[in-house]
Image (cartoon, rainbow, N blue to C red):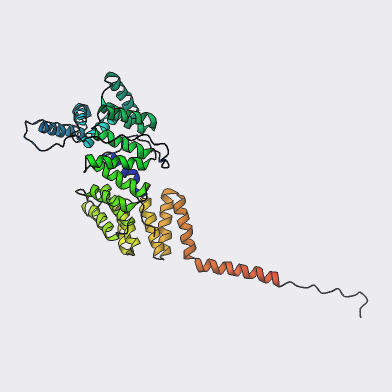
Amino acid sequence: MRPVSLIAVSMFVSLSAFGQAAPRGTPALATLADSEGQEPTPVEPTVPPAVEAPTPIDDPASEKRVLFETAMADYAGNRCEEAMGPLKTLVAAGYHGSDSAMALRACYDKLYGIEGSVTKLRAEIAANPDDPVAHSNLGVFLMFQQQWDEAQKEVIKALALNPKDIDAKLNLAWWYAQVGQSRAAVREHEAILVLEPGNKRSLIELCTLLAERENDPKRALPYCEAHASGMETNEIAGVTLGLVRMRVGDLEGAEKAFLRVVEADPAARTATLSLGHLRQYRGDFDGAQAAFEKVLVAEPKNEEARLALARLFQAKKDFGSAITNYKAAYKESQSGMALGGLAKAYLQKYFLLVIGGLLAAMGLLLWRYLNVRVPEPPTPANAV
């Protein structure tokens, strides 16, 4: 069986690594061929901002911490109007930069939508042209609109105004990834990790860029493991780590990664399916069947799980059960994949009968071809 590809989770991994959730209405972003010929000049890394450390409550860092906790509580409580001002302050100060920036962009989207956020941010920039936070966020929303050239200009403007802005550096790296210049994106993320070694967003982006775009899972694995460290039960982190471990041949480690997620959250569908695929790959058909059926108990119409179960039965040569599951999948989705699998399962089940029928037909044709009757000559009229 073919090992599960990271493609299966790349859609939500990349956006979830970018933030807690993709903004509503986010269009699918283009993935172009890597072009090293005409890369925009990467911004050089600069001195990182000072690391915030726990300090007494009257210290400015503690005030920022209180402001951060209050802003995030407002954000979590859908009080974006109250949260946006403090979040802008925190992003400008670089305090919990990625978390603050993600929450701020989510609030823009919640209040204004993508197009409205572009309009709102342009107005903010018109009022204050030297606002690096507005320039960086405008660049992100322009990326959602696939206005790549203008998006890059806005992010680079943000970095010109604030060279220490880690969030803007992350946005520039993400821009490189979205326009297909994965090697430039890798360089940017590696530079960010020099400045901020534990940056989770850079770690997951390097994990997926190197594993998928550069097809170098061995180089990707340390970044995947660093990203998952401390959050092994997170489905995105655990599944991504498990899939990359599969690609480097560490099947035992992959199963551990999937199990950590499933044991913490039995409803984790992607982790459960990945565990089933891995078990089938390792020859544990019973374990694979249990995983696929577990998903189907919770989601009877889940086509991915239904097709996986059908293919498992094919591998077990239980063609009758395979046909039953392919029929169920086709009934729900009318997909060509289910129909093709159903046809193949029928051929496998009735292989001998089909071959026997074909041989009989060929024999009949051959017999008719070889058994040519020679007509008898006519008898003369005057013959005695």
Which residue ends up furthest to the right in the rendered image? 382
As displayed, is residue 81 above or below residue 356?
A: above
Residue in front for this viewpoint, 269 or 173: 173
Which residue shows up at 32% across the image and 23% down it?
Answer: 122
As displayed, is residue 254 above or below residue 37?
A: below
As displayed, is residue 371 above or below residue 52?
A: below
Q: Is residue 148 visible?
A: yes
Report x, y in % for residue 348: 47, 64
Report x, y in % for residue 299: 32, 50
Q: Is residue 293 visible?
A: no
Which residue ends up furthest to the top in the rendered image? 127
Instruction: State the image quarter where residue 255 is shown.
Output: bottom left
Where is the N terminus found, in terms of image quarters? bottom left
Instruction: State the image quarter where residue 322 is shown.
Output: bottom left
Where is the C terminus found, in terms of image quarters? bottom right
Instruction: State the image quarter where residue 89 is shown.
Output: top left
Report x, y in % for residue 240: 29, 50
Report x, y in % for residue 377: 84, 74
Which residue shows up at 42% across the image and 56% down it?
Answer: 326
Which residue shows up at 34% across the image and 56% down it?
Answer: 247
